[in-house]
Amino acid sequence: MKILKFIISWQFWVSVIIVIAISFLLLQGTFLWLNAYTNHGVQVEVPNLSNLNLEQAIVKLDESNLEYEIDTSKYDPKYKPYQILDIYPLVGSNVKKGRRIFIRANAKTWKPVVVPNIIGKYKYLAFSQLDLVGLKVSDTIYEPNLAVNTVIKILYKGKEVQPGVTLPRFSPLTIVLAKGLAKNVSVPSFIGLDESTAKGMITENLFSVGSIIYDDPEDKGNARVYYQVPVPSSTYDQGQAIDLYLSSKPLEKLKDKIRNLDQTFNRRFINDSDSLNLSRPVNEFENSPSTRNNTTNTHNSETNTSPPPPKTNTSREEHRRPNRVIIE
């Protein structure tokens, strides 16, 4: 009974009317706010951007109060850099102000790629890796090196580049490959050089450093090379070892040692030339005493088929041992 009396009372109906009025006002206010916030009924036509470059297109979109998102991830050489290729929504469509427009434009150039690490790899594997990332091999150069047909260097526009750097896609590269070590190369002279300089020159000429023999191991400060094996101007295979003899004494005090070394290694050369890979100069024997003494006899006997008999007072070893020119 109390509930029924409350329902039919005037206080209840006043409360209901007030609630309905407040709800109506709230709904109307919400709709008005949404219309203002979403620009309901206000539309903008998507402008034609096909004949504009990217900078001009951005200006025109800003004037129309339109947002934009630009994609320049791909490059097509058939189009100009930053030329607009596609737009969404389509040109002429009516959109609200503030709508985001999606633009696909041509990139400025090819996207940079990372040079892979192909140093030391076999050439066909290295070329395949370069092709996968979009780099071209325009030329190959061969240099002496032990690992045949492996990559030694990567050159771009004549300059060496290291793996990991970024280059434009389809950049032409020059690949330096190893061709193996040469044979019968003339040995340079290391006489007069200190140990460090001599070792550097040996490595630069693609030989290996052999034994280092000091005349006085306790006096290495001013020591210089006074003898080497193989001797200068002889032929030798790259990669083979070169032995160095060093001393701090002047050359005039090393004459006997040089003569003994000459005798030792020349005898070994004569008896076992293949083991040392040495080639004696043609005129090495021309200055020997026995040769000078027999010059006339040899010249006069050129027409004879049999060689002249050796002198009885000259031993076989003395006849074979050449003189070495020593600078006083």
Image: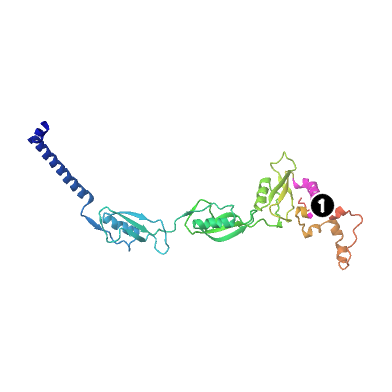
Image spot of residue 325 (x, y percent): 78, 53
How many marks are shown on the rendered structure? 1
The part of the image, by quadrant, that contains residue 10 is top left
Q: Which residues are magenta?
A: 250-273
Comparing 235 with 324, the one in front is: 235
- In the rendered image, the residue lying farthest to the top is 2
Kind of residue sitting beneath label 1? Arg
Q: What secondary structure characterizes most of the magenta part?
A: helix
Determine the residue located farthest toward the bottom in the rendered image. 303
Q: Is residue 212 visible?
A: yes
Where is residue 212? Give x, y as percent.
72, 45
Residue visible at 84% across and 59% down in the picture: 291
Residue at x-position 33% and y-position 59%: 87
The answer to whether 292 appears left or right of 138 in the picture is right
- Residue toward you, 305 or 262: 305
Q: Position of residue 232 (x, y in %)?
A: 73, 54
- Residue at image x 52%, y 56%? 130
Say if the magenta span includes residue 267.
yes
Q: Find out whether residue 76 is within the magenta segment.
A: no
Q: Mark 1: which secondary structure?
A: helix
Quick one: 51 or 122, which is closer to the camera?
122
The residue tagged 1 is 267
State whether residue 322 appears in this view.
Answer: no
Q: Which quadrant would the N terminus be assigned to in this image?
A: top left
Looking at the picture, tell me which residue is in the foreground, 91 or 288.
Answer: 91
